[in-house]
Image (cartoon, rainbow, N blue to C red):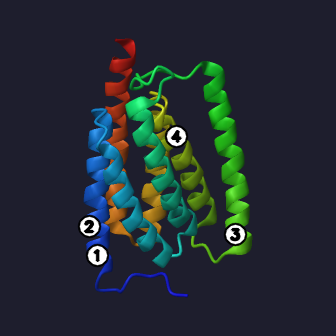
Amino acid sequence: MEFAPPAVLAPYLEWSAFALAVGYVLLSIRQIVWAWPLMIASSLLYGWLFAGSRLYGQAALQALFIAIACWGWWQWRRGRKDDRPLAVTLLAPRARIGVAAVWLAAAVAGALLLARLTDAAAPALDAFTTTGSVLGQVLIARKYVDAWPVWIVVNTVAVALFAGQQLWLTALLYALFAALALAGWRAWSRAARR
């Protein structure tokens, strides 16, 4: 079965996914709930593009992103027990260690699976960025400041992953995401202190 978008369509898909993804991050930094529909649209386009580039972890990640975006949308609107919107908070130090341990274990398991079961182009980087992205997105959905340092690491590694597949615009996008994650970290840190 062929997953690749037609060659003539691929650049337009990448540009559209790029624009939607940047919009998602910018709205997320400002805690605007309409970030989530942009993420859903971007994830649909990137899923198709990544499947065609044999980045199967990244393609599967887009399906998870769509599910997390639906959940995050609801969380941002009514995520507290009293049905009020979530506030930005920090993870406890012990929880941070747990997040790092889960990330490492999932990345190793994912890399082994991708290397053994698929013709993945870069199993280790694909698994590392995929698992880190899931964790980062869950932390964003629950408005934890700690999501942004996770995103800085994921985005920096993703630049190398996408450049290795000659997805230059996507590599540029993730470099921009790394810078935006730094801005998000600062903005959400200030919000948590308030």
Give the class, few, some or many, for how many residues have Cα within 10 Å of label 4's Cα (few <14, many ≥20).
Answer: some
**Residue 112 x/y as whole percent:** 73, 62
Q: Give how far apart the Cα atoms at labels 4 and 3 are.
A: 26 Å
- Number of numbered markers: 4
Q: Are marks 4 and 2 in contact (CB under 8 Å)?
A: no
Of the numbered discs 4 and 3, the one sitting upstream in the chain is 3
The residue pinned by badge 2 equals 15
Tag 2: amino acid: Trp
170 relative to 59 in the view: left or right = left
Where does the N terminus fall, quadrant-wise? bottom right
Residue 103 vertical position relative to residue 130 in the rendered view, above or below: above
**Residue 106 x/y as whole percent:** 68, 49
Q: Are marks 1 and 2 in contact (CB under 8 Å)?
A: yes
Residue 9 vertical position relative to residue 135 in the rendered view, above or below: below
The residue pinned by badge 4 equals 138
Q: Give how far apart the Cα atoms at labels 4 and 2 are.
A: 26 Å
The residue pinned by badge 3 equals 115
Q: Give how far apart the Cα atoms at labels 1 and 4 are.
A: 29 Å
Residue 194 vertical position relative to residue 99 in the rendered view, above or below: above
Q: Residue at x 29, y 60 (%)?
A: 18
Q: Nearer the viewer, residue 34 or 170?
A: 34
Tag 1: amino acid: Pro
The residue pinned by badge 1 equals 11
